[in-house]
Every structure is written in structure tokens, then in C-alpha cells.
Image (cartoon, rainbow, N blue to C red):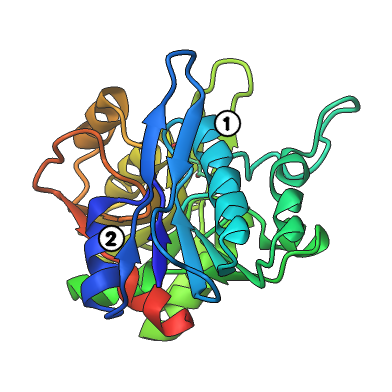
Amino acid sequence: MFICLSGTPKSMIAGLSLVCKRHVYQPFRKIFPDGEQYLRFDTNLKGVELSVVQSFYPEQDRKIVELYLALEALTGLGAKPKNVIALYVAYARQDKRFLSGEPISVKALYQGLRLYSVERFITVDVHSPQIFIDIGLDTVNIIPHGFMIEQLGLKIDIVLAPDKGALQRALNVANKFNVTYDYLDKFRDRVTGEITIDSKALDVKGKNVVIVDDIISTGKTIAKAAEVLYKAGANNVYAVVTHALLSRESLDILSKAGLSRLVISNTIEQQLDLPSWITVIDLSPILCNVL
Ligand code: R5P
């Protein structure tokens, strides 16, 4: 049985129910006048093995608290929350002390899961799976780009990562489709946030290029990469990105980039109506497989 908390996108809930053919349950929830949360499972779950699903965006802090309230309540009922499926993991990028005096946010927020009978922490394209393993969680990290490209039937000639650190994603896809892969040189100005991307004189003339990445936030990385690749003569530039934290501003930036298609997944419930050049892929089939 799946317990779907409030961050779980509607299309994911439908997929988990129809594709995985498992019962989906959502707790009763309310917010007290002072802003605190309340939830309740008004059903008998004694001895039942569960997968608790949550996505921690938007309202990251509230969604994390909701997960802990749910785990405590389920434990109190004698249920067995064996898997926590974190579709989008908030605070994942603060996985080390970059400067002295900073917290390791991942540690602060997720090591508490060890207090419950959680056996597996299932994440989707999380920034650094290793930190979750280091804090004692048996972590399975799903990388969905190959599946997403397959679902859409995109014809691609070359796969690119927007920076060297993301090369493994490009390699996975390239192996699956037997095409070449490489990375772009990305530099982000830490003060202005401006992004510079260099195509490193890659040969993309007349080719169908796919950029694979984990997150769209401002949209500048993908937009800049597309601009550089079209200038270098690419035929089509597609972007396949797991987590889309889309805002009006990022959609404007991306729409000017002229992408042939932006493919995102349903790890996050979109707050805006999406234009026709964006396709959302349901990842529930991969989750069913992992379970
Ligand atoms: C960076 O390390 C990530 O992989 C993404 O490339 C980045 O978060 C995208 O951010 P934005 O859309 O703001 O350029």
C-alpha cells in the first residue's frame, strides 16, 4: 500500500494506483490557526507494509515535518513504513559544510528517518545519493532520463551534460541509446547568478542534441546551453530534466531558448499551466519496478 502525503503530484498518485495496482491512501490533514499541521490515519494499518510517498517542493519545510508526523502516526498504529519514496528531496544540495559553521542540511533533516522502521530510502535523481548512504539510510536512487526519452520516442544523436559534474547522467543515456556523449563547460557567477556556457567546439552541426540534467530552477542553465548549441549548428535541442521547479520567470527564460522540446517528470506538482513544448512523463512505472 502507498501512503501519499500532500506533496505527491496527482498524476503520480494515479500512476501508483493504476500502474502499480496497489491501494493508495491519503491521511486526513488540517492546519491549525497558528500554522501547525495535523494529520490522522483513520483506518486500521496494524502490521501493514507501506511505502510512504512525499515530494518536498514547494513548501519544503512543511513537507518534511509532514513526513515525520506521518511516520510517527503510522508507527503508533503498528504499521510498517518500509519504504520512504522521496520524489524530490529538499535541501539535498547542502550535502557538506562548504564553509565552516554551516550545517550539513541533509544530515540534519533526514538522519531522523533511522528512528522508524524505514528500510529503504528511494530517491529520484537526488543531488548526491552517497550522503544518504553515509547517514545510514539504505538508499536507492532512480535515474530516469533514459526512460523519459524512451517514453517520448525522441531520436537523438548526442547526449550532453550541462557541466562536467553531471557527466554520469549523459553516459547512462548514451549507453542506453548507443550514441555519443560529452559535457559543456558551465560557469555560474556566484554574485550575479549569470551563467556562461562554452560548447568546447563540440561537433553538433545538423545533430539532434539532448541535454540531460537533474533540476531546472531559474532555467538559465538549459536556456544558455540551448543558445550555445543552436549557434553551433544543432538541428534540434531537447532538454530532459527530472525535477522542474518552474516559475513564470523560468518559463519565460526557457521559452526564449527555442527548445524543440523540454521533457520533465512528475516528481513535482506543477503550479502553472504548461505550454505545449513541455511534456511531463509519469515515473510511476519505474517506481513500481523498484518496489
Ligand atoms: C546544478 O548543479 C544543477 O545540476 C542544475 O544544472 C541547476 O540547479 C539548474 O539551475 P538553473 O535552472 O537555475 O540554471
Q: Nearer the viewer, residue 129 or 87?
A: 87
Is residue 272 found left or right of 121 in the rendered image?
left
The mark lying in front, picked from 2 and 1, is: 2
Which of the two residues, 121 or 36, is positioned nearer the viewer here? Answer: 36
Q: Is residue 216 left or right of residue 68?
A: left
Q: Where residue 198 sits: x, y (%)? A: 50, 43
| Amino acid type assigned to the residue bearing label 2 in the image | Ile
Q: Is residue 119 left or right of residue 270?
A: right
x 39%, y 61%: residue: 43
Between discs 2 and 1, the one toward the N terminus: 2
Q: Which residue is mark 1?
A: 188
The disc at residue 250 is none
The response on whether ligand 1 sits within 8 Å of label 1 is: yes
| Looking at the image, residue 202 lies above or below residue 38 | below
Q: Can residue 148 be spotted in the picture?
A: no
| Image mark count | 2
What is the three-letter code of the residue carrying label 1? Arg
Residue nearer the viewer, 105 or 4 = 4
Q: Position of residue 258 (x, y in %)?
A: 19, 41
Q: Is residue 207 above or below residue 280?
A: below
Provide residue 277's location: percent of width, then percent of height.
Answer: 13, 48
Residue 192 coordinates in the image, percent (x, y)? 55, 16
Above or below, 162 against 151 in this view is above
Residue under label 2: 13
